[in-house]
């Protein structure tokens, strides 16, 4: 069948046979339906006689995503649901409106939430689990992805997280604003920070440093010639990088001495003491004092999140170590990400202005599509939180809705065992805002590892969260848990929670920030009452 004419039209069944023969492996009707539904191949025919062209199929399977799908299924299994890869989306789609208001490691993309809580059905999602006016609960709400998507769809949402800072991020995303008042306050703070100057010669130092760096990089790391030489192995990158790094470091040190630049702070007791160059710390302290003077409390919170996002980007670290800090970087260095000599940051001014403008734009976009549903965030331990009491104390109107219908279900991504220390990833914010850290209440943190004891503790923790939520759930509830369950813990978690796994969706995770780009998947477990 692979010799058919390129414009030959095939039924879905014939397309399965052709693709199976072409690829040398079984392709199901669901696979072909996915390609049609998501626009990978053009649909021909009407009234139940759907057809596809041979050439469209061939082009897809020879494309990057098509060949990647085949390769990943070889390594991860044929049960990999490529429809949930969302490989057709651009980064601007997966970070739409407020979803990029602040970095957050380990969050899922909004389209994954939307897929399960909206009212569509397809060849893979056979039922509608949530409808407008229902209540969804996220007991590990993180930066609020579930709550934001629920609000966009007109679904009421409750988010609970042990981290006060996480709840703050979510609140800022979901609050209603007088955007004119907010823009005015943001512009005032931008002006104050831009005009702030200490007698440190930093501006003159950076101007000369930029000039010398530009000349040095143009000469030694011309783009794209330098990258091509590495690719063709005409140059030993390790050896050359070390030589040039040492060569420019001499220039850098002379400039530091010339302008009397203070690189390190006198103390290193806290995160902000350790991970910021002295001038950056001065600007952070000044900025926060200005923000404290803002009278509008909601505007003040937005500005605090902008400052937090800014200082996260201005830590004294290399560009390739932003996600996992190693040691403070206070000198110039060879950057493995950008393939040239890079420098640490000496000022927050550019980044604060950039993020301030971006934040206003994103809040404005989201305000246009908000759907008026109720929402609430609770900074508490989901193993013991009393949702009914919290709702009654904090939102009578939401409490009234809850009493009538209870919670329809859960959509959440519990922490993965031994992978992330959730408080530590925002240590700078806890220092800045003087929030109490509750690391000891995290379930499955990195610092506890992935050993037998850690896994057993994780199972008990997640099971307690689900058990605590059950009294607040409607009779015919639906629970969706997004997890990378390589230790096969979730069958036990479901059993301990008095629930049963009725379905599971295995999805490829395509766009990861880690250097490890090996095929990787996660499972969305669907649980119901036994």
Image (spheres, rainbow, N blue to C red):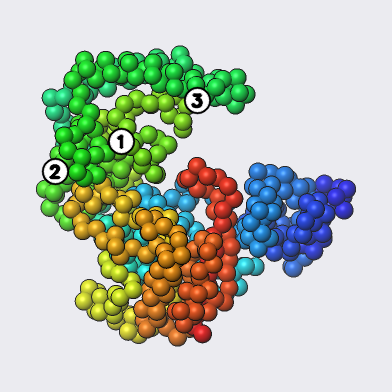
Tag 3 or tag 2, which sits nearer the N-term?
3
Q: Is residue 179 above or below residue 339?
A: below
Foreground: disc 2 or disc 3:
3
Measured from the top left, where is residue 430 in percent x and y?
23, 52
Measured from the top left, where is residue 372 in percent x and y?
34, 67
Q: For the residue labelled by badge 2, is the local secondary structure a helix, a strand or a loop? A: helix
Q: List the residue tagged with mark 1.
A: 328
Q: What is the spatial separation of the Cα atoms under label 2 and label 3, in whole angstroms?
A: 45 Å
Q: List the residue tagged with mark 2.
A: 290
Q: Is residue 313 above or below residue 204?
A: below
- Figure quadrant of residue 245: top left
Tag 2 or tag 1, which sits nearer the N-term?
2
Q: What is the spatial separation of the Cα atoms under label 1 and label 2, in whole angstroms?
A: 27 Å
Q: For the residue labelled by badge 1, is the local secondary structure a helix, a strand or a loop? A: loop
Which labelled disc corresponds to residue 238? 3
Q: Nearer the viewer, residue 409 or 490?
A: 490
């Amino acid at each position: 069948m692979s010799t058919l004419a390129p414009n030959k039209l095939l039924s879905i069944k014939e397309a399965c046979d052709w693709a199976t023969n072409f690829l040398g492996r079984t392709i199901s009707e669901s696979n072909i339906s996915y390609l049609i539904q998501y626009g990978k191949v053009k649909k021909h025919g009407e009234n139940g006689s759907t057809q596809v062209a041979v050439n469209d199929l061939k082009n897809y399977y020879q494309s990057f995503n098509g060949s990647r799908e085949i390769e990943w299924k070889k390594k991860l299994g044929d049960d990999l649901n490529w429809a949930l890869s969302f490989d057709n989306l651009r980064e601007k789609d997966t970070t739409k409106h407020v979803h990029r208001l602040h970095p957050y490691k380990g969050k899922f993309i909004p389209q994954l939430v939307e897929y399960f809580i909206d009212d569509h059905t397809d060849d893979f999602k056979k039922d509608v689990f949530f409808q407008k006016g229902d209540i969804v609960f996220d007991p590990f709400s993180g930066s609020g992805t579930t709550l934001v998507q629920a609000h966009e769809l007109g679904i009421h949402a409750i988010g609970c997280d042990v981290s006060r800072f996480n709840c703050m991020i979510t609140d800022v995303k979901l609050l209603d604003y007088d955007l004119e008042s907010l823009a005015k306050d943001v512009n005032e703070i931008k002006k104050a920070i831009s005009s702030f100057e200490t007698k440190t010669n930093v501006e003159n130092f950076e101007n000369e440093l930029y000039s010398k760096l530009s000349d040095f990089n143009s000469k030694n790391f011309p783009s794209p010639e330098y990258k091509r030489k590495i690719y063709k192995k005409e140059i030993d990158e390790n050896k050359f990088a070390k030589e040039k790094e040492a060569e420019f470091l001499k220039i850098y040190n002379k400039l530091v001495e010339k302008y009397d630049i203070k690189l390190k702070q006198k103390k290193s007791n806290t995160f902000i003491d350790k991970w910021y160059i002295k001038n950056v710390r001065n600007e952070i302290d000044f900025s926060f004092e200005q923000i404290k003077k803002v009278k509008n409390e909601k505007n003040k919170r937005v500005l605090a999140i902008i400052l937090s996002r800014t200082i996260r980007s201005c830590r004294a670290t290399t560009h390739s170590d932003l996600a996992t800090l190693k040691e403070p970087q206070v000198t110039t260095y060879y950057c493995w990400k950008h393939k040239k000599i890079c420098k640490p940051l000496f000022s927050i001014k550019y980044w604060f202005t950039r993020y301030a403008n971006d934040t206003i734009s994103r809040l404005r976009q989201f305000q246009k599509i908000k759907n008026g549903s109720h929402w609430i965030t609770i900074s508490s331990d989901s193993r013991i939180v009393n949702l009914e009491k919290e709702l009654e104390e904090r939102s009578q109107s939401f409490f009234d809705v809850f009493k009538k219908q209870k919670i329809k279900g859960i959509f959440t991504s519990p922490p993965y065992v031994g992978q992330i220390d959730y408080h530590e990833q925002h240590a700078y914010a806890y220092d800045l805002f003087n929030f109490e850290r509750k690391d000891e209440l995290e379930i499955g943190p990195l610092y506890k590892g992935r050993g037998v004891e850690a896994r057993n503790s994780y199972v008990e923790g997640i099971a307690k969260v689900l058990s605590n939520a059950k009294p607040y759930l409607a009779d015919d509830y639906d629970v969706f848990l997004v997890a990378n369950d390589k230790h096969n813990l979730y069958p036990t978690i479901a059993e301990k929670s008095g629930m049963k796994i009725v379905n599971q969706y295995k999805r490829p995770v395509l766009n990861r920030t880690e250097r490890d780009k090996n095929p990787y998947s996660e499972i969305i477990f669907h649980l119901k009452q036994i």
